[in-house]
Image (cartoon, helix red, strand yellow):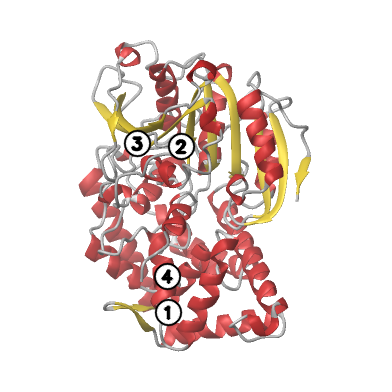
Amino acid sequence: MRTSPALRAAALATTAVLLPLAGCSDGGGGGGGEGGSNPTRASTASPTATSGKLATQKLEWSACSAPNVAQGGGESPSPLPGGAVWECSFMDVPLDYAKPDGRTIELALIRGKAKDQKRRIGSLLFNFGGPGASGVATLPAFGADYDRLRARYDLVSFDPRGVGRSEGVECADDAQLDALYQEDGTPDDAAEEKEFVQGQKDFIAACEENSGAELPYVGTTNAARDMDLMRTVLGDDKLHYFGISYGTELGGVYAHLYPDKVGRAVFDAVVDPTKDAEQSSLGQAQGFQLAFDNFTENCADRGDECALPGATGQEVQRWITDLLAQLEKEPVDGLGDRPLTQTLATTGIASALYSKETWPLLEQGLDEAEGGNGALLLALADSLNGRSEDGRYDNSNAANIAINCADSRQRFTLEQTKAALPAFRKASPVFGEYLGWGLMSCTGWPVAGAWETPDVSAPGSAPVLVIGNTGDPATPYAGAKAMVERLGTGVGVELTYKGEGHGAYNSKNACVQRAVDGYLLNGTVPESGTVCG
């Protein structure tokens, strides 16, 4: 079963969810070794390398090689529309910004040069989320979608520290991950709880053994500092930025640290900066349930055209939850020697809810699973878990956990997690328990988290266009309003998209794209409160 490249790209460009070992992107800016619990602005005491020798380094650009395993594998990026080629390079950054003359690491970069060099504004830097998504692998997958912006910008993205080719965090190997994903992500008794907790401990021990020296330095604050050094090395006075999902949180932290360096910035699919780890996970449970409700209502409304039984959305949901209960007792054939379990089926459902374009695949996969063929649902789960057809995993899950745990201060005991489960089940009968158990992802992590929520206040910053999607499953709509409020008066400009899926610009909605293109290309700021249907 070949996973759609578009689906894989969408999975990379999102907040990781429903992984037995991974929590959700909850916010948080620093991490051990990143400036303590309340780093100040770069203009006062925040460590920076933009005035040292690293700021004068010259990047050597050349044709991009094929993505490596950590980036997800595959072929070298196809030419841009019009035949231009993607170029790749590496940039040196300090491992520890408190020691700018100490050890350095390399960040992998990619760019597509602007078509109109005479009217070129500068570089437009993308972060596609996760945390853990390889920008070097993801940007070419969406190259055609952003080609209008290439009229006046070099389109640039990167693998953040700890991701892909940028000193990618290494944890469990492929065989261990296969085994871990087969485990029950929602333990029902003491024996399953023991197995779940031990799986967490083993995974964290592998992370510490393989990447322990880097784990204190992979959090969001250091990634923001990297972006400011990148801005300098690329030759830009201001950082023009397009952040998606977790990329909005990273952009918010950057704006807080360097408000005077913010150029034209867009935040799409917005992480709520006011919510801690538990609140964020609970919000995601509600968001995925909303998207699931919309999927099942759509199915019921189509009547006999839908392959799933049920005259109402609730009836379709009951049929699906019954199927999941059956899979817990008796998995069905999946791919190769890997069966489709209840946990993997739920991950597959979540994967398909990221875009309305993949609803037909979800419908087909559920229908086939009920008949004993779980291949399609398992392929959907693989796309979110970062598993390629040859059985290799990228490092997006390891990076996701490492960055989240460097950012988030919260650590949950088994007892605290179990106490929180009723609220999660109420938020979502389908996804709540999985997300609830995910609270333990950072329990026992060797690095202390920086804070409970990130500071994104950015007085004096240029306007930031903040786009919320009413049907977004992974970053619920309310996060956009919260981000606007936290950025501060005169900074956040809110735009609402009434649609489905994770993010708005790639929905192809003409109203959203006009607003974004108008701001990024011409500097035209839309009226805050604009609504696109």
Label 4, label 1: how far apart the Cα atoms are: 12 Å
The residue that label 2 is drawn on is 450
Residue 98 position by quadrant:
top left
Q: Is residue 295 visible?
A: yes
The residue that label 1 is drawn on is 189
Mark 4 or mark 1, which is nearer to you?
A: 4
Sort mark 1 into few (<14), some (14-19) or many (20+) by Cα contacts within 10 Å: few
Looking at marks 4 and 2 on the same chain, the residue that comes earlier in the sequence is marked by 4
Mark 3 or mark 4, which is nearer to you?
A: 3
Label 2, label 1: how far apart the Cα atoms are: 33 Å
Q: Say left or right for 479 vs 173.
A: right
The vertical placement of 510 against 486, above or below, is below
Sort mark 4 into few (<14), some (14-19) or many (20+) by Cα contacts within 10 Å: many
The residue that label 3 is drawn on is 161
Label 4, label 2: how far apart the Cα atoms are: 27 Å
Sort mark 3 into few (<14), some (14-19) or many (20+) by Cα contacts within 10 Å: many
Give, as a three-letter code, the residue at label 1: Asp
**Secondary element at tag 1:** loop
Labelled disc at residue 185? 4
Sort mark 2 into few (<14), some (14-19) or many (20+) by Cα contacts within 10 Å: many
Looking at marks 2 and 1 on the same chain, the residue that comes earlier in the sequence is marked by 1
**Secondary element at tag 4:** loop
CB under 8 Å between discs 3 and 2:
no
- The picture places residue 65, in percent across and down from the top left corner, at 26, 40
